[in-house]
Amino acid sequence: QVQLVESGGGLVQAGGSLRLSCAASGRAFSSYFIGWFRQTPGKERELLGTISTGGGNADYVESVKGRFTVSRDNSKNTAYLQMNSLKPEDTAVYYCAARWYSGREYEFWGQGTQVTVTS
C-alpha cells in the first residue's frame, strides 16, 4: 500500500509555470506506475500523463503534450508534474495516483491540490 500527498499547487498567471509534487509513503514506490489527473467541477477526472516504474517512459494526453512533463525520483519516493505555458483552462484540482506495475486500476490517490490560472 502507498499513501500519496500532492503539493505545489497555487495561483499563477497565464503563461506561467508550476511544479507539482507527489510524495509517497509506504513500500515499493518504484513498483507503481504514477498517473497525474485533474478534475474541474461538473467534469470527469481527466488523465493527463503517466510515468513508468523506473521513469524511463512517460505518456501524455494531447492537450498537455509539449507543455507538461511527468517525472519521478524513486530515491525520494516522489513524482512530479512540471507544467509550463499554463492556460486558464488548466485550472483544476490536480491529483496523483498509483497503479501497481501489473495492475489495471489506479488504487491509491492523493487528496489533490488546486491549480488556478488567471488570464
Image: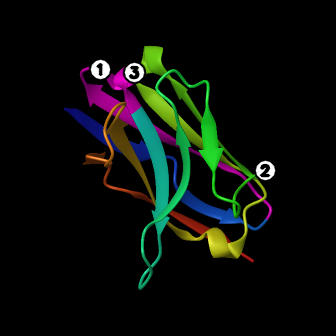
Image location (x, y in percent) of residue 26: 23, 25
Q: CA distance from mark 3 to mark 1?
A: 5 Å
Query: Which circle marks residue 28 in the picture?
Result: 1
Amino acid identity at mark 3: Ser
Label 3 with label 1: CB-CB less than 8 Å: yes
| Region of the chain picked out in magenta, as a range | 15-32
Q: Residue at x 79, y 58 (%)?
A: 85
Q: Quadrant of residue 43?
A: bottom left
Image location (x, y in percent) of residue 72: 53, 28
Report the quarter where the C terminus lies: bottom right
User: Dot 1, crowdedness within 10 Å: few (<14), some or many (≥20)?
Assistant: some
Looking at the image, is 74 positioned above or below residue 24? above
User: Dot 3, crowdedness within 10 Å: few (<14), some or many (≥20)?
Assistant: some
Image location (x, y in percent) of residue 60: 64, 50
Query: Which circle marks residue 66 in the picture?
Result: 2
Q: CA distance from mark 3 to mark 2?
A: 25 Å
Looking at the image, is 40 positioned above or below residue 55? below
Amino acid identity at mark 1: Ala
In reply to whether residue 21 is colored magenta, the answer given is yes
Looking at the image, is 1 positioned above or below residue 115? above
Amino acid identity at mark 2: Gly
Disc 3 element:
helix
Q: Quadrant of residue 86?
A: bottom right
Disc 2 element:
loop
Q: What is the number of callouts on the image?
A: 3
Query: Which circle marks residue 30 in the picture?
Result: 3
Report whether 5 appears left or right of 64.
left
Identify the mark nearer the N-term, 3 or 2: 3
Q: CA distance from mark 2 to mark 1?
A: 30 Å
In reply to whether residue 97 is colored magenta, the answer given is no
